[in-house]
Amino acid sequence: MSYTIQEQMNNIYEKGIQLISKHEEAILKEWHTVTARLQVSRERSQKNIDDTVHYLANRLFHTTKQAASTEVTLSIQTNKFIITLLENAVHKVIQAENDFSYKDHQAIQYVFIKLSEEVLTQPYQHYFAIDSFLQNLVTSNQLPIVWTAIAIKRNHQFLVEKWFNHLSGDLLFGDEPIKASTIYGLSELLLNQMEEAGKYTVFPIPYEDITILICVRKEESNHVVPFVSYALQVFQNGKESFQLTKQDQEWKDSVIMFNETVMRSRNYQEAVENITAGFVNYLPFERCALFSYSVDKQMGFGLFGHRLDNEAIQNITEDISNLPIIQNNLHFLELFGQSLDYLQPLYLKDAEIGFPSEYIKQFNLRSVVIAPIFLASNNKLLGAAILDQGPGKYFKIGQESFSALIKFGQSAGEILAKFSAEQETKQKSDQVRIHLSKREVEVLQLMAEGYSTLEAASFLNLSEYTVRDYVSTIMQKMEASNRTEAVARALREGIIE
């Protein structure tokens, strides 16, 4: 079964909640210390501080203390700052543990990102609540609506859950709820409660898992019904756009977390490991294999595997011609690469289409995604991450995953290129520091070819003692502990062939 970025980010959120919940007592104690200081320095914000702590305690600990069921309306202007201070207090408490990791830090950070979003969007939430929509319909002076109601189905019967009218008076008489086996029957019962019931009509509109009832005068129903239906559609479009905006933020959060992780890498190997794990930790995948790509040799080389046999991945050296679907995409890139804004991930519903059978069998591949690792400045392909949702699993991925994969590939390319450049610079710098004379290079070359000191002396028409002095000087300049190490370094750095 496929899963999404939203589900993956929810897992990170739940991990953060669990970490925080385990330290409830210590966190509340630390919050008390923080708020005591704030109350001294910001007396006018005391209510905002208390409300913020109350709000966070309810959301994080599900506590029943201090009237937990009461909704708290937060002031965005003041409480964004307070929330940040309270988040720092949580980090302080949990970081005191020896086994605290950077992933734990990110999980807690993400919890507070989502809580802050709740606070920031709270003033707009009511615009997309069906209650507010119906209340506004009734109170509008533009529409002759008598009342509206929300009907739900429970135990095979329909009943009114909520209702709205101009006067906020009681729509029904008596304490017993009115029930009916059909929406039509419920509408009739409600009309019978009204004076001059024959002058009114009720029309139902199905909406999600409820039914909206609209009561109007019969003579006005012809023009009210189409307008309400249209207004409800506009309301629904706005609500869906709001939800899509929130979902869009989730894949961007995953990109931010990935970037933060890979930027902490201290060297090339650490970057490779962080990138490979990051594709799994922040995207909806279970396994990742990272490969480098040589344009000149048209070869792929295994670098690292996360939740895979790492040694098996590193032993892979594959000619791209054996991967036709990848080769075709590379040819497309060569033709049009300069005009592309980014390199596209490639989704294969069945890996048998593009991979040799030996890999299909060895790693039990089904659906896979190939995410290019590239430099955005020139669209230079450096390698690829091959991803799936576990051995033998078919899956699909959404557009938000493709968007995130592009950003992941770009960030991974930047950090790998940075360390590769540093490594090349270091090697060149090391070569510059080694000043060998022409004669010393000749002695090194003979050492590499297996000549003994006596044989080298005879070949160069020098004394054995002179050659020994040359060997000693060479080893000192190259910071080598023996002849073999000196020769190996000279070969590696191109001083000799």
Image (cartoon, grey):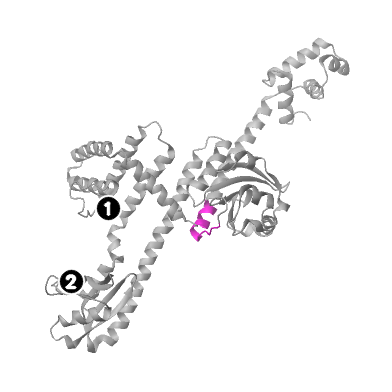
Q: Which of the 4 image quarters holds residue 437? A: top right
Tell me where residue 218 appears, x and y as whole percent. 23, 88
Image position, residue 292 (x, y; %) = 64, 45
* Residue 143 can be seen, yes or no: no
Prevalent SS, magenta region: helix
Q: Residue at x 74, y 31 (%)?
A: 494
**To which residue does mark 1 refer?**
76
Q: What range is drawn magenta here?
A: 394-407
| Amino acid at circle 1 | Ile
Is 270 placed left or right of 335 in the picture? left
Residue 201 rendering spot, x and y as whole percentages:
23, 85
Q: Which residue is mark 2?
A: 177
As drawn, the label of residue 265 is none
Looking at marks 1 and 2 on the same chain, the residue that comes earlier in the sequence is marked by 1
Nearer to the camera, 459 or 143: 143
Residue 364 lies, with reference to residue 449, above or below; the image says: below
Which residue is painted at 24% across and 81% down in the image?
A: 185
